[in-house]
Structure formats: structure tokens, C-alpha cells
Image (cartoon, coloured by chain):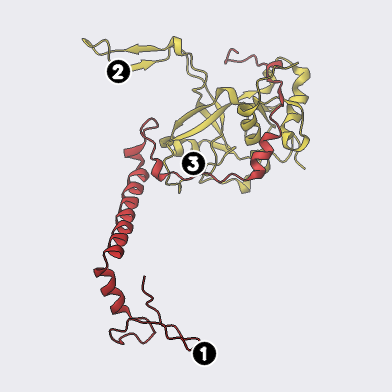
Amino acid sequence: MMSGKIDVFLNEEFVERHTLRQGDIVKEVHLLGAINLNALHYSSPAGNPKELASWNVPNKPIFGDAMIVSHSCEIARENMVKVTSIILAPLRDIHKATAKERIDELIKSNLIDQQNPLASFLKYFYIAPNSALEYPDGAIVDFSKIFSVRNKSYDSLLDKKIAQLTQQAASSMALKLALYFHRKGQLAP
Amino acid sequence: MKNYFCQQGSSKSAEIIPFPLANSLSSSGTNIEALLIDIFTDPTIKTHLETIIEGAIMDILVKSYVANFEVSDNPFDAIYISELKADHITGHDVEKIANYLNIIDLSNTISFDDEWED
């Protein structure tokens, strides 16, 4: 039985090195989520102020680990259907969580498909500590900061792949992701 | 459409089934020549075949175009609906998601003190 801390990752020898799968963790990618649209700077060519030719974000780029949340079939190389983007969600160090007393509850919420809970932390999916990751206490995947990159980035992301979830863990992650968008809008008690 | 394959009459009814035997070139029981003549002279079949061939050619062209990421890698261009097919969703999948419709999200009860500033 999978818990919040065991059977989350495939053993090293079973990790698929030549393909990206839903739940793969990639290291040190430029995290593009949560951009402030009001802070973007646009540039126009001289004499044509209405044409926007370029833009920049006046902030330091954030590099970090991320999880592939695209469906495995959708990003498969053999898939000839129009797939132009690969969707990622950033990882955040759980050590930096502000409500330490709720971390155990957050970890257990990974078992959403087994416990049928009335409440859960739908925005986060817990990632247990792993030798390939730099989070001694584990990390969370933050679904609220999802972003996409072009499929031209496939090989670049593959080079950065450091871990792969088990099928069961990937399925639990996908269920949480689906429920994060599907749930009714109720406030926490 | 005519029947181009040999059939045996029923031994009970002794019924004889019409068969367009222009010649007997086929030893396997299929009159290929008659079949081809009818195909190229029957407007309905001809139109039907043309539709199939044109569809196959278009399919190859579209797949060739879509597979060329250098050309079509624009996430904001047209959606080639003709190339899409519905994802398979089982009743179990829908039921599973629906079971959690009223789940309460506790995400706002925890936050992170990191560079994301939320």
C-alpha cells in the first residue's frame, strides 16, 4: 500500500530515461508560473508605438525543480496529434511551510483516492524525500503555479529528468490535480 | 452492389445465385476482371473510391504537417479538429471524480515562506 512517504518513486533501474511521463521531476528549469501581468514591460519599434515587438519581466528568473503534469499520452513522441505544449508545476520545499502542525495532514492527503476524505489540500501534492532531490523533508507540487513550455523543450526537459513517480503515485497526483479544478467553491472551515 | 464471390446454392432449395461470369480467369473463385471493370464503370463506386483516396492523401499531408514541429510549433495557432479524436473516458473515471464534488479544500490553511511571495 502506498503511503505519503513510501512507494512514490520508481527505483533507479526502472526510470525511463528516454521519455517523459506524467509525474516526472525535472531539475533546475526556469519556473515561469505566477507571472504578474501588470509588471510586464513591452517595447515597440521606433515610429510604431502600437506594435508590440518584445516584452520582458523585470524580475530575477526563478530556477527550480518542477513536475511534468501533462498526461503521458499527450506528450508521447509518437503522438502525432497536435500537442504543442508540455505542462509543468513547480516544486516547493516543504521545510518552508508556515503551518508546521499541518504538514502531516498534508502528507496524508496524498492518499485521496484511498481514504475518500471530506477535505484535502487540493492545491498541493506531497513529494517524499529522495536522494535525487534536494529537499531533506520533502517537497510539494504547487498546482496553482502551473505553466507550459513549447514541445521543443522536450529534449531539454528530458536531460533534466531526475526522478519518476510510480504509476500509483502519478495517478494520485493526477486525481488531486483534477479535483483541484473540479471541486465546488467552498471555503475551508 | 453485385456479389463478386462464388456462392453455393442451397441443397434444399436448389436456388441458383446470379453471378457475373464474364470469363473464368480466377481459379480461386473470384472474378477479378469483372470486379475491376465494374469498379471503373460504376459511377457510384468510382466516386466512393475517389473519396477514400482523397481522404487518405489529405490524412497523410496533415499528419506530415503536424509531425513537423519546426513548422507547426505555435501553441496559439489553429486547432486541427480534424486530427483530434476524443479521449477515452470510462464511467468509472467520471464517477470517481464526481464522488469528490463536495470536497473541502484546505490549501489556504498552509502557506510557504519562499521566493514565490504568496
Q: Where is residue B11 in the image (x, y as percent from the top left)?
A: 52, 90
Residue appearing at x 36%, y 87% in the figure: B27
The chain letter corresponding to yellow is A
Question: Is A107 situated above or below B42?
Answer: above
Marks 3 & 2 on one chain: yes
- Which corner quadrant holds the C terminus of chain A? top right
Question: Is the residue at mark 1 from the same chain as the one at mark 3?
Answer: no
SS under mark 1:
loop
- In terms of secondary structure, where does tag 2 sit? loop
Mark nearer the N terminus (3 vs 2):
2
Which numbered dot is residue A53?
A: 2
Regarding residue A131, the answer to whether it shows in the image is no
Q: Distance between the residues labelled 1 and 2?
A: 83 Å
Towards the viewer: B114 or A183: A183
Query: So how many labels did they put on this image?
Result: 3
Q: In 3D space, how far apart are the residues under numbered discs 3 and 2 (Cα atoms)?
A: 30 Å
User: Where the N terminus of chain A falls, by quadrant?
Assistant: top right
Q: In this orientation, which residue lies closer to the viewer: B91 or B65?
A: B91
In this figure, which residue is indicated by the disc labeled 1?
Answer: B11
Disc 1 packing (10 Å; few <14; some 14–19; many ≥20): few
Chain B colour in the picture: red
A97 displayed left or right of A75: right
Q: CA gap, disc 1 to disc 3?
A: 60 Å
Q: Quadrant of residue A183?
A: top right
Q: In which quarter of the image is residue B115?
A: top right
Where, by quadrant of the figure, is residue A175 drawn?
A: top right
Q: Residue at x 68, y 22 (%)?
A: A94
Residue at position x 69%, y 28% in the image: A138
Left or right, A154 with reference to B89: left
- What amino acid is at disc 3? Ile
Output the chain of dot 1: B
Residue B98 picture location, percent across and down: 67, 34
